[in-house]
Amino acid sequence: MDQASKFPQFYADPDNWVVYGPDANCTLALCPVTAGVYQYRPSIAANVVFLVLFGIAMIIHAAQGLKYRTFTFGSLMVIGCISEILGYGGRILLWQNPFSFNGFLLQINTTQETRITLTWKGMAIVCITFGPVWYTAAIYFTLSKIVIYLGPHYARFPPKFYYWVFIPCDILSLVLQAVGGALSSTSSGGSRTAVDVSIVGLSWQVFTLCVFIALSLEFAWRYTRARDASRRVLPTKFKCFVGFLSLAILLILIRCVYRIDELSDGYSGPLIHDEGLFIGLEGVMVIVAAYCLSIAHPGPVFGWPKNEASGPEDLGVNNARKTESA
């Protein structure tokens, strides 16, 4: 049966049907799913798997943060996992009815006078979009740890520089992506301004991440070229830590480049309607990065923080020299 025969009311007078928004009157029984913003019904199996995997990752990062007292790193990772869980929860609800607005209304009170209204569709866009921003913030803290561990005199900048510069940049990226997603959720996916704001936020995240990678490589180059006696022999667990941290950075970078390309044509482009690419280049990239960062957790390498450490409470390196023999 063709679409016109299956949905005769919709094709008889398509202008009378609203596929998304507060006045939406479409349902899966009355309108073809291709009339929706995404033009597909999200996979229930894939989204449940991602939701469960992010839930497990959240528990792992929370346990590691408590065990090693790496509260800043752990909190950022947990918030990122919660954001992903909410986003995939929104996609599961969209599987039930891609056209529903009021049924999946999410209201967030910012102040007593101001109320931001989002739908579950908007939550899926916003939360999944800026979830990795929390992961990159956690990553930015680790470079300060590495500099302290290997020796601040090898770095071009003091340890505090890395988080005082990159964390505000990350916050800006977070705000831009959140605003873009929120505008998209209230415009039925038709706002070019919303798309442009989201692209700016993602592009800024990519730029910040690339600058971070460049500074990290520059520090590694300065360290490896040093010939002084104080340069330590790197233990295996530190090399493992750096390897999985680097992989997580690469995966997040790939994901961000994909999302920029996906949004480049707005919500009418081909990539936004390809769920397979979304699963592979968004879901898989981010969940693997989350687990890489559990292996690349700073606690096992750097130990518990000291009170006299420079920067946030979990930026200290406890008896770092002792790890040489690990």
Image (cartoon, rainbow, N blue to C red):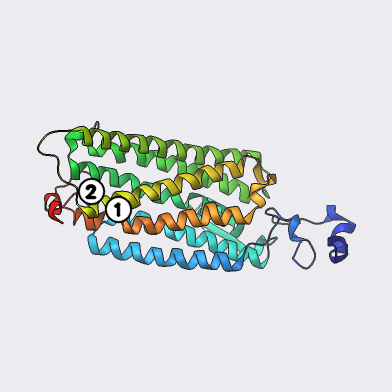
Residue 178 as seen in the image, left or right of residue 70: right
Q: Amino acid at mark 1?
A: Thr
Q: Is residue 257 above or below residue 115?
A: above
Q: Say which of 302 and 205 sits in front.
A: 302
Residues 300 and 233: in front is 233
Secondary structure type for disc 2: helix
Q: Quadrant of the N terminus?
A: bottom right
- Dot 1 lies on which element? helix
Residue found 45% across the figure and 51% down from its top = 132
Residue 18, numbered label: none
Task: Give the labeled residue for mark 1.
Answer: 72
The residue that label 2 is drawn on is: 315
2 and 1 marks in contact (CB < 8 Å): yes
Residue type for callout 2: Leu
Q: Quadrant of residue 91?
A: bottom right
Q: Residues within 10 Å of mark 2 (few under 14, many from 20)?
A: many
Q: Is residue 219 left or right of residue 52?
A: left
Residue 213 on image: x %, y %:
36, 38
- The residue carrying pointer 1 sits among few (fewer than 14), some (14 to 19) or many (20 or more) residues within 10 Å by Cα, namely some
